[in-house]
Amino acid sequence: MSFTAGALLHQESLTVADLFEELGDWGRVRERVRDNNLLRMRTPSASKRIFKEVTGRLRQLTPAQLALLRTGNRQEQNHLLWLAICKRYRFIYDFAVEVVREKFLRLDFLSYDAYDVFFNDKAEWHPEVEGVAESTRKKLRQVVFKMMREANLLTQDNQIVPAMPTPREIKVIVADSPSYLLAFPISPAEVQEWLP
């Protein structure tokens, strides 16, 4: 439940991924980012918070996924950043699979109410979710929807946009785990077609 530090963080993620490719060490990347304010934050504490969030996500990606994030087109980058978020936060992965995917398959739009129902269902089984304040719940919902919009998986009026992953995206996702394909709005037929 700690994903309110930013939304997709596209540019920040690319900056850090490129530096990691150059330096090969997360500690050295942190120092370079801090010393040169490479994330362009107003305060050192904001930079530290965003860096922590970005690296927490990027560390979820396999070397092949990180390489494609650095060299891919904007769509591939957006999808890989969404994948990193889903891998980092089980709550968001479950939301993507259980709600977004189901709404997509039924050709339904994604409502805030659907998110709220999902959140309340999770709260029944997870005390850490139940204890989240109402204001934080709304902020979390706002951030999840913003992430999806920035990843081009959701329109401004909450219509779900079908993901159209490229062959190289599919390759690096399936090599990691085919179950991660379910985090994207794609048809079951496409999923089956892409499985080894």
Image: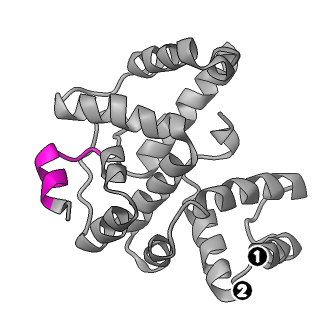
Q: Which residue is mark 1?
A: 29
Residue 138 position within the rendered picture, expressed as x and y whole percent measured from the top left:
59, 22
**Is residue 39 rendered to the left or right of residue 170?**
right
Q: Which residue is mark 2?
A: 23
Q: Which residues are magenta?
A: 185-193
Q: Amino acid at mark 2?
A: Leu
Give yes or no for residue 188 being in the magenta stretch. Answer: yes
Residue 2 position within the rendered picture, expressed as x and y whole percent measured from the top left:
69, 38
Q: Amino acid at mark 1?
A: Val
Identify the residue shown where x is 66% and y is 79%: 20
* Marking on residue 54: none
Identify the residue shown where x is 33% and y is 27%: 110
Whichever of callouts 2 and 1 sits on the residue coming sooner in the sequence is 2
Give yes or no for residue 123 being in the magenta stretch. Answer: no
Label 2 to label 1: alpha-carbon separation: 7 Å
Label 1 Cα crowd, 10 Å radius (few <14 / some 14-19 / many 20+)? many
Residue 94 visible in rendering: yes
Q: In the rendered image, which quarter is residue 1 located in?
A: top right
Identify the residue shown where x is 31% and y is 52%: 181
